[in-house]
Image (cartoon, helix red, strand yellow):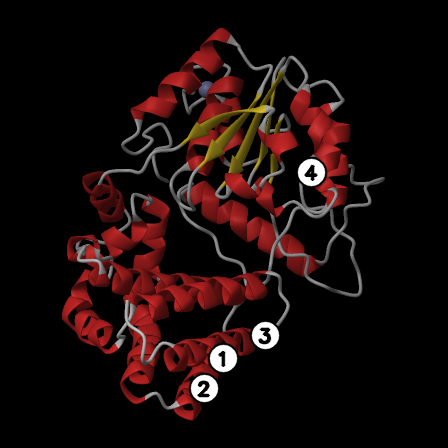
């Protein structure tokens, strides 16, 4: 179990959080923002632990309240996060403890429940960990409906309650409208914590009613310490640069041996740049992306994005900013073959478009990738003669 009280390398947000908890200024919902793995969840749990602690809000970690917050069993800690709604004949389970076991409409399959429990088990072990799902996740309207009902009742154990809704950008259509009033006027006894990795995608009506606390990046040294604790003694520069201050992302990169995945994405791109053989490229894309999970495909888009971004930095002479620093020479060689910056800009556009199409779940992974490469090839043809 990672020490929750030690929020890596960022005293600033802790100061304002301490003020909120100690002075009981909790009329306003708090929005913790920052990229995945940066520590939003960890900080939220830490706040909840302190707010509900039976030892004078110390977050002692010893009392029954602290312990039950940390294993997500506290009846007055209402935690919601996006999960995949996996289809099944029978939808019989409620997945969160605040849902009324008899009257709730929010019912899901055994598979969904299993995914929810896996998320909780992994987060109890390490709140920084980024938990991946095989299928797209959201926060269904029915869950929000149950949550609002639960918030309308008195806390069960003590005088206080914590509501934490993670990744609010993943609320299903209609859910955020429904939730707005509760965010606007949380009950006096309730500390409302929201988290998001993408504050700019959240409706302004919701955003404007929150106190936003952005979580600053952890230092490289803090991340190295954290990784050592997880059993990774050596940390590649690529991983540190890729994680950009997010401990959870650095861990995930190690656990999933992301450098290997990066190499694969890079090999397909560099082969394409060298040979411009679309049939060969399509074949390679098919082979790697056919059985890829939703979250894995999203990671690969991100890996490719960082390669294209490095190309751009090479072109404008900012070589010291490269993320894929370990393959710098190869990147430079390929960048020379791209005769204009316009190509890289077009490619970035095509990539963002393809990633969005994938995000909407509109096409299969391999089609999204192939479509993107077809646009890459078009940009190469168009920009062959021009130069920037
Ligand atoms: Zn305690």
Residue 211 vs 348, above or below: the answer is above
Residue 339 vs 122, above or below: the answer is below
Tell me the CA gap for discs 4 and 1.
Answer: 34 Å
Q: Residue at x 42, y 81 (%)?
A: 377
* Residue 49 as seen in the image, left or right of residue 153: left
Q: Is residue 380 visible?
A: yes
Q: Which residue is mark 3?
A: 364
For label 4, the SS is helix
Viewer-nearest residue: 337 or 135 = 337
For label 3, the SS is loop
Q: Which residue is mark 4?
A: 176
Residue 333 sits in which quadrant?
A: bottom left
Q: Viewer-nearest of labels 4 and 1?
A: 1
Tell me the CA gap for discs 3 and 1.
Answer: 10 Å
For label 1, the SS is helix
Residue 282, numbered label: 2
Quarter of the rendering occupied by the C terminus: bottom left
Q: Viewer-nearest of labels 3 and 1?
A: 1
Q: Which residue is mark 1?
A: 370
Label located before the other in sequence (2 or 1)? 2
* Residue 381 as seen in the image, left or right of residue 240: right
């Amino acid at each position: 179990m990672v020490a929750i009280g030690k929020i890596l390398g960022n005293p600033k947000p802790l100061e304002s959080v301490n003020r909120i908890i100690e002075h009981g200024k909790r009329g306003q919902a708090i929005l913790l923002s920052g990229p995945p793995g940066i520590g939003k969840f960890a900080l939220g749990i830490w706040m909840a632990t302190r707010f509900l602690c039976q030892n004078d809000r110390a977050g002692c970690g010893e009392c029954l309240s602290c312990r039950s917050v940390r294993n997500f069993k506290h009846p007055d800690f209402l935690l919601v996060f996006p999960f995949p709604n996996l289809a099944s004949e029978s939808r019989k389970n409620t997945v969160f403890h605040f849902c009324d076991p008899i009257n709730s409409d929010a019912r899901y399959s055994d598979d969904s429940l299993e995914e929810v429990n896996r998320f909780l088990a992994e987060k109890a072990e390490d709140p920084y960990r980024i938990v991946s799902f095989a299928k797209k996740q959201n926060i269904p309207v029915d869950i929000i409906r149950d949550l609002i009902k639960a918030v309308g009742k008195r806390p069960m154990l003590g005088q206080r309650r914590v509501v934490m809704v993670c990744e609010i950008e993943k609320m299903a259509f209609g859910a955020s409208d429904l939730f707005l009033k509760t965010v606007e006027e949380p009950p006096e006894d309730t500390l409302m914590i929201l988290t998001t990795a993408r504050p700019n995608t959240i409706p302004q009506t919701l955003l404007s009613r929150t106190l936003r606390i952005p979580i600053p990046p952890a230092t490289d040294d803090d991340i190295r310490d954290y990784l050592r604790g997880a059993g990774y003694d050596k940390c590649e520069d690529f991983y540190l640069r890729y994680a950009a201050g997010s401990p959870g992302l650095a861990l995930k990169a190690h656990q999933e041996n992301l450098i290997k995945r990066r190499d694969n994405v890079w090999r397909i791109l560099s082969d394409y740049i060298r040979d411009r053989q679309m049939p060969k490229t399509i074949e390679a894309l098919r082979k790697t992306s056919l059985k890829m999970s939703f979250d894995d495909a999203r990671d690969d888009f991100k890996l490719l994005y960082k390669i294209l971004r490095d190309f751009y930095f090479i072109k404008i002479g900012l070589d010291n900013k490269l993320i894929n620093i370990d393959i710098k020479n190869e990147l430079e060689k390929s960048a020379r073959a791209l005769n204009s910056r316009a190509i890289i800009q077009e490619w970035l556009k095509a990539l963002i478009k393809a990633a969005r199409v994938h995000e909407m779940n509109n096409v299969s992974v391999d089609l999204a990738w192939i479509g993107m490469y077809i646009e890459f090839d078009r940009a190469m043809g168009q920009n062959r003669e021009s130069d920037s």
